[in-house]
Amino acid sequence: MNYKRILVFGAHPDDEQTMSGTIAKLADLGVEVYVAIFTNGCEGYPKPEWKDTIVQMRRREGEDSDRVLGVKERYRFERPDMGLINDKQTLQETMTLIRRIRPDAAFTHGPHDRNRDHIAACEITLEALWQGGQPVCAELGEPWNTPHQFYYKGIADRPPDLVEDITGYAHKFLESRATQVSQHTLFGKDAAQFAAEIQKMKQEHSSAEDRFWFTQRMPLRGFPDIHG
Ligand SMILES: [Zn+2]
């Protein structure tokens, strides 16, 4: 992944963590990693008394995760959780972001998913990555064709097109997960369990990999040396 800038889309404030190992590895190599999250995660509260504070909690947790992984900038669309739709405003906001960041590669959700926001995020990003490169909506910035476009999850029907070795970074997944305190109930682990597992994983330094699939919505252009 010989990139200068990558843009990782997620429906909810932690979806990007599926590829935490890759994000942390690339950030260490000097790649600028941008994260764009569509919804505010307002429905992700496991306790009724957190309903009014969950958005604020998840915003902070997202920032904590970014520090753990070395993310350069997080963009929040603040759409309602369980209510993301591919409307004109969201599409254009996504196009604007793509044209501003001009990523070498974008990563998004795949279409095989039970979560409505994940499916909508997949549709919005695929369309914005295409329309963002077209000579339309000139006011939103100069068109940018993102050379490489990947799914990082939500693909059930084919083997991965790219397998990234994240040996030495596998614990970053758990480290980023651990920052999402409001989601610990969902993950089925408390802070102590996270700490113990992270410690064990660091010691073992076991080999690990992240898997990616081409979106195949654009003609593939091979794997150019972007730094070259
Ligand atoms: Zn999600």
Image (spheres, helix red, strand yellow):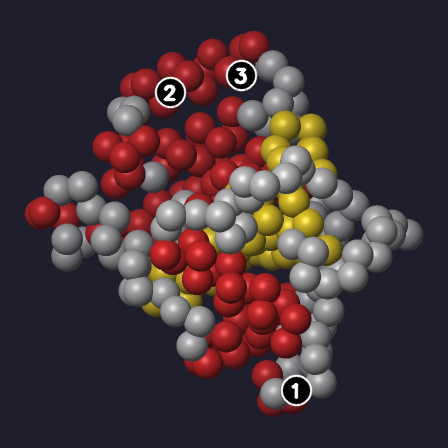
State how many labels appear: 3
Q: Which mark is residue 195?
A: 2
For residue 164, what is the image quadrant?
top right
Secondary element under disc 1, as helix, strand or loop, is loop
Q: Residue at x 79, y 56 (%)?
A: 220
> Residue 165's x, y, as percent?
69, 28
For residue 117, what is the image quadrant?
bottom left
Q: Is residue 87 above or below residue 63?
A: below
Q: Amino acid at mark 1?
A: Val
- Specify whether 173 is left or right of 139: left
Q: Amino acid at mark 3?
A: Lys
Q: Residue at x 45, y 20 (%)?
A: 198
Residue, disc 3: 202
Q: Amino acid at mark 2?
A: Ala
Q: Which mark is residue 136?
A: 1
Upstream in the sequence, badge 2 or badge 1?
1
Q: Nearer the viewer, mark 2 or mark 1?
A: 1
